[in-house]
Amino acid sequence: MGITSRDIAREAGVSQSTVSRALRGDPRVAPDTLARIRDVAIRLDYSPNLAARSLITRRSDSVAVMVSNIRNPFYPQLLDSLYAEFTSAGFRVVLLHDRAESGIGPDPDLSRGAVDGVVFVSADLTDRLPAKLSDAGLPVVLLNRDVDDIDVDCVTSDNVAGAAQAAEALVTLGHRRIGLISGPGQSSTGRDRDRGFIEGLERAGRKLDDRFRRVSDYSHQDGYQWGMDLLGQSPRPTAIFCANDVVAFGVLDAARRLGLRVPADLSVIGFDDIAMAGWETFGLTTVRQPLDEMAKSAARMLIEQINEPGRNPRRRVFPADLVRRQTTAPPPSV
Amino acid sequence: MGITSRDIAREAGVSQSTVSRALRGDPRVAPDTLARIRDVAIRLDYSPNLAARSLITRRSDSVAVMVSNIRNPFYPQLLDSLYAEFTSAGFRVVLLHDRAESGIGPDPDLSRGAVDGVVFVSADLTDRLPAKLSDAGLPVVLLNRDVDDIDVDCVTSDNVAGAAQAAEALVTLGHRRIGLISGPGQSSTGRDRDRGFIEGLERAGRKLDDRFRRVSDYSHQDGYQWGMDLLGQSPRPTAIFCANDVVAFGVLDAARRLGLRVPADLSVIGFDDIAMAGWETFGLTTVRQPLDEMAKSAARMLIEQINEPGRNPRRRVFPADLVRRQTTAPPPSV
DNA sequence: CTGAAAGCGCTAACAA
DNA sequence: TTGTTAGCGCTTTCAG
């Protein structure tokens, strides 16, 4: 199987190394030699064996993107932007789910030159893998998460400020029984959004009632379940802040299930502003993260690390702002 | 950078090839030799260089999954199932968008041993790439698409029968002004669902009115746009069949925008039954494809092709059945 | 500007 | 059961 550079060399009447040079665009190849080699290469449908190349260059020209659950609509959007950026820089993208991490020892997919770098989009703060890989010299970027105690590149938005805006908006509308469905405690976004929301509430002279507080795993199912739970209480909250949009969709579903009107009976705010949040059916008021920019920024950071090993870790924080749509209103007058 | 099998060999006092054998689980390595080697390997955090291995084995242990637009919620679900199946069989998954195909010549990511096989989940019938790759000896599987004139493995559902069920259901409910928003004409699913729907209508003694017919690219935006268009006519259709769920969501959005109640004023049926279709907010009546099974089947087919080159192409068709939810009802009595 | 030669780290005959 | 040897196909000095 397979045409090699040797075949091209023989056919073009040059040495194998000249073929290699020519096809890599080395400037010191004579124009007509180049032309001849290129012709033969095209005619024989040749392209270089990547394993052989990467064995010698110590580059795989591919990067890994680690997500926790691709079915969660939050990730595909990020993944798409990452993909676009990496592809246009000549990198292949390998998909990784972090369930795989459960094993001991380094992930085989990440070790020994399988990829030139990794973007982590998963959320677990307790996860030591990024630090381990980074220490081992592999370029690593954390996207949408932040970890204080390790020195790697991070791209986030201002989760604390964004969540605080949500709190203020709710208080300003007149809500007093306000619910909170947090993200996982091991995630930096979950933690920061919690803090921001509670601080925002307190700044407005309100305190969060513990009976109105639940913790989700960022899934639609958890949003639905805790939404049903919260809204089944009496008195029930008149507003719920959800640590991400998908959970907010779950709460919206619960409200609909219970026959509550949004926003007349219940206000809901999400976080992220994924594309679906803007769909007419949801019209979700949410805190917008500039996801595409964040992804592009993360990709570029990784590429820079790859091309310039030993850079100092950088941290990039984007603004996060409330966008008002149709799921927020003053509380019912009762 | 990097510990090699040589280092392990020296440390363990054996030859390099014994290390290779031991770590690959070759049975003819003495138990204590094996133990010693394994100890050293773990201590030195060794794992084999994949490029070197694949240079010689002619295997990359990775497969590509080609999708057209990962932001479309249809794909992540399939991708997740494919991923699970491939990963548990020891394959890495490389993500590919078919925008990249635009270039001339074989996709560099697919050529020369970069991957051991490809699953195409994109939909374009006019695309010659699968045939070209397959002819070149690369294992290829088509998922959710079918092409008559090329000989590769296909996994689909019975799109014709499924769409016919949708037509019959609508007619049985009493609808007479029925709209159709098709998928792209170059996609096999678009073509088959069209045919099935029209045949189903005819079998029930109805004919599709061309004024109620639009063609989408399977996106939410097209669904919204054509939904607005169709529903802006007078008289307007009382039911719309959409060639996939995402388009149906767009139509639902359009209906809501126009103040129409679903299903009282308008019935909507989708196709696929992606997870979101079952969310309370949508409650979409749709034709269910067993997506997870289809994906697993496709992955297994590809793996079999990889392990057993030169198999005869197979074609696997799953049933597709209507699932009734909240978006269908008899037409308004006016 | 081009060719010869070395060798990346591994697997896989082939011997012993 | 283990070691020796020969490459896989490429990139990269080093000569010329």
Image (tube, coloured by chain):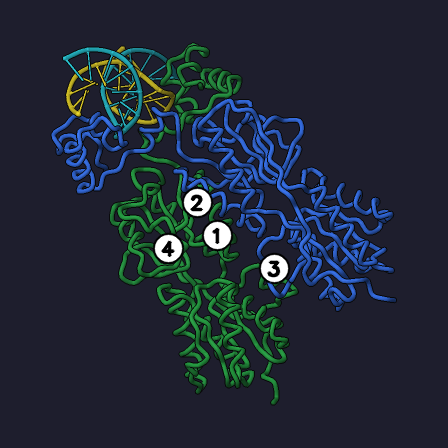
Chain colours: A green, B blue, C cyan, D yellow
Cα separation, mark 3 vs mark 4, equals 33 Å
Secondary structure under the numbered disc 4 in the rendered image: strand
Which secondary structure lies at badge 1?
A: loop
Q: Amino acid at mark 1?
A: Ile
In this orientation, does residue B14 appear?
Answer: yes
Q: Could you classify mark 1 by the number of other residues whose Cα lies within 10 Å: few (under 14), some (14-19), or many (20 or more)?
A: many
Query: Could you confirm whether marks 1 and 2 are on the same chain?
Result: yes
| Nearer the observer, B210 or A152 | B210
Q: For this rendering, which residue is in front, A261 or B36? A: B36
> Does dot 3 land on a helix, a strand or a loop?
helix
- Check if mark 2 and mark 3 are on a common chain: no
Quarter of the picture containing the N terminus of chain A is top left
Left or right: A163 as drawn, with respect to B196:
left
User: Which chain hosts label 3?
Assistant: B
Check if mark 2's residue and mark 3's residue have beta carbons within 8 Å: no
Seen in the picture, residue A38 relative to B206 is either above or below; the reply is above
Residue designated by label 2 = A95
| Mark 2 vs mark 4: in front | 2
Q: Chain of mark 2?
A: A
The alpha-carbon separation of the residues under discs 2 and 3 comes to: 27 Å
The one of B23 and B252 positioned closer to us in this rendering: B23
Residue B236's spot in the image, x, y percent?
83, 59
Within-10-Å neighbours for mark 3: few <14, some 14–19, many 20+:
some
Question: Where does label 3 land, which residue?
Answer: B278
Label 4 belongs to which residue?
A142
Disc 1 vs disc 2: Cβ atoms closer than 8 Å?
Answer: yes
Q: Tell me the residue that label 1 is attached to.
A: A70
Q: From the viewer's perspective, is the residue at label 2 or at label 3 nearer? A: 3
